[in-house]
Image (spheres, helix red, strand yellow):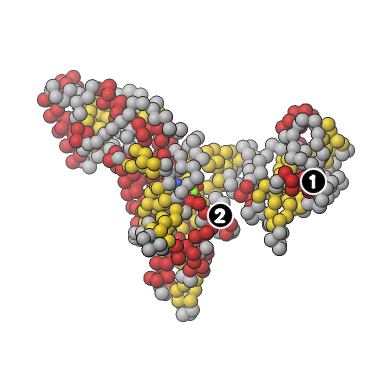
Amino acid sequence: MRLSQFHLHTEKETPAEAEIASHRLMLKAGMLRRLAAGLYTWSPLGLRVLRKVEAIVREEMDRAGALELLMPTIQPKELWEETGRWQKFGGQLLKIRDRKDAEYCYAPTAEEVITDFARNELASYKQLPLNFYQVQTKFRDEIRPRFGVMRAREFLMKDAYSFDIDAAGMQRSYEAMHAAYVRIFTRLGLRFRAVQADSGAIGGDASQEFHVLADSGEDAIAFSTGSDYAANIEAAQAAQPGPRPAAAEELRKVDTPTQKTCADVAALMGIDLSRTAKSIALVGADADGNDQFVLALVRGDHDANEIKLAKVEGLAGYRMATEAEILAHLGSEPGFLGPVAPKQPIRVLADREVAAMADFVVGANEPGFHLAGVNWGRDLPEPDHVADIRDVVEGDRAADGGELRIVRGIEVGHVFQLGSKYAEAMGCTVLDEQGKPRVLQMGCYGIGISRIVAAAIEQNFDANGILWPDAMAPWRVAVCVINPKRDDAVSAAAEALYRELSDAGIETVLDDRGLRPGQMFADIELIGIPHRVVVSGRGLEAGTFEYRARNAEESENLDRETLLARLRQPKS
Ligand code: ATP
Ligand code: MG
């Protein structure tokens, strides 16, 4: 490609709306243009990168034996009603009507459509296993679209769905996809980690996310120094706490006139925050579906984990208690709540760590007071329920004996064992070896292709712009011509080099725009071309080209042979 014939439109100014590096650099480099909230046009430059990612994903899916198909982006309501997701999917589902008033949604994902396809196509176990995938636009009406294509409303996803006759088959299909994902992110040249994920309300089924590691990531990931254990903070667990020590202190009331948080109380008393427990008033449902008041306790230095809470019996779909409910059950306004001597009987849910505490501090259920020296079994009954309901923190002991560390990540892929959830709801069966109908076991596997482009930049940029890994770069090499209009020999030499590199299968762009060198180099650095070669009159006289890798401090003068050898071997 000759840049004089390309549409490159870089910006000098830093766009005000961009909060993170990838968003800023994609706009500055002219890869993206915003159309409306969460909707972007990919320019020819941006699209070159997107297609690189897509091609690698496709190659590895094909290599893993998955079969590509293409499903519509518009899906009929009736299919979504079969699984109950027309209601359950919530506000992210964009619902639309056609001229006959029939209802549809714009695909946020395609489990229903693929299961419908499978139930119509498949008749016998002999046709299995099968894995169908597509690379197709998705729409999710995100509450807060942000960071450009990182969390867009319309985005490009690869979604795959496996069909097996039994759970062992599903497990094999899942592992094949896991291995394919490792290959994909390795080939893309990204630093990534596969982590255990929360598998949602279905429970039990395995699910892993692939995260590109970057400080700007929206997710927190915990990993152990003792093994390869890694999990999204939503699901991460620390080791079981040790046994509860014996009570050593007497129960006493402490004057805390204005101290409404554990931190303030601990500061006042001059004790460590980990000696306090905070009380969180929740409303769940009992076995009959009636409101049930629950007091959840986590250590003062810990945070409750919403996803873990919702997994506790009776707390699926819980909400926070209102002030009136708190007053009725505990007799105190928020700020001084505690599990000791509530006004009405309440269910007490203790985090594992809190259940293992002795001589701790809680609210006294009386404005202006806390209780210290509190002990289970003596000052209040043993908790009704003990569970892991907190976020792990840096330095926690891991189950394998190591320590937990926390880093940030960007979720770029998700592999999930669905089991029979969709096949059951939609009657997707085949005849098994005995000739009996059997509900199929499914897996689903997503990759955010457009998100990967942004995530890669978050990992690879400097003050001057993007540093693409070779595999994702719009072009691997830029040949920059100094004064092409003034110097015919220079132009001819650059042209010859450009042809030679292109003929050798090295993707090269010729910067023949005739810009001043400073401007030209700034553009080439901004758009992240990994290898730059400068052709100048001076170099020609010396018989050399000036070569510089995007991530190198210095340039080198190389003769033609050395240059070609250098560029031929992909560096990554
Ligand atoms: P997130 O937690 O980030 O919202 P998700 O769990 O909703 O992601 P999946 O339903 O597993 O995502 O979708 C598969 C992949 O699609 C994700 O791993 C992610 O890479 C990508 N993806 C999901 N939502 C978006 C979005 N709004 N914009 C861009 N990519 C997205
Ligand atoms: Mg989401």
Q: Is residue 215 above or below residue 174?
A: above
Of the residues shown, which amino acid type is indicated by label 1? Leu
Residue at the disc numbered 2: 199
Q: Dot 1: few (<14), some (14–19), or many (≥20) neighbours within 10 Å?
A: many
- In the image, taking residue 167 as reference, residue 113 lies left or right, namely left
Q: Which residue occupies the foreground of this view, 498 or 138?
A: 138
Q: Which residue occupies the foreground of this view, 226 or 110?
A: 110
Residue 19, given in percent of the width and then of the height, sits at: 46, 33
Residue at the disc numbered 1: 330
- In which quarter of the view is residue 398 placed? top right
Foreground: disc 1 or disc 2? 1
Indicate the quadrant containing the N terminus: top left, top right, bottom left or bottom right.
top left
Of the residues shown, which amino acid type is indicated by label 2? Ser
Residue 306, given in percent of the width and then of the height, sits at: 62, 47
Residue 41, given in percent of the width and then of the height, sits at: 33, 42
- In the image, taking residue 542 as reference, residue 380 lies left or right, namely right
The residue located at (46%, 42%) in the rendering is 145
* Label 2 CB less than 8 angstroms from ligand 1: no
- In the image, taking residue 235 as reference, residue 20 lies left or right, namely left
The residue located at (24%, 29%) in the rendering is 533
The circle drawn on residue 2 is: none
Indicate the quadrant containing the C terminus: top left, top right, bottom left or bottom right.
top left
SS at badge 2: loop
The residue located at (41%, 63%) in the rendering is 102
Q: CA distance from mark 1 to mark 2?
A: 35 Å
Residues at marks 1 and 2 touching, judged by CB atoms closer than 8 Å: no
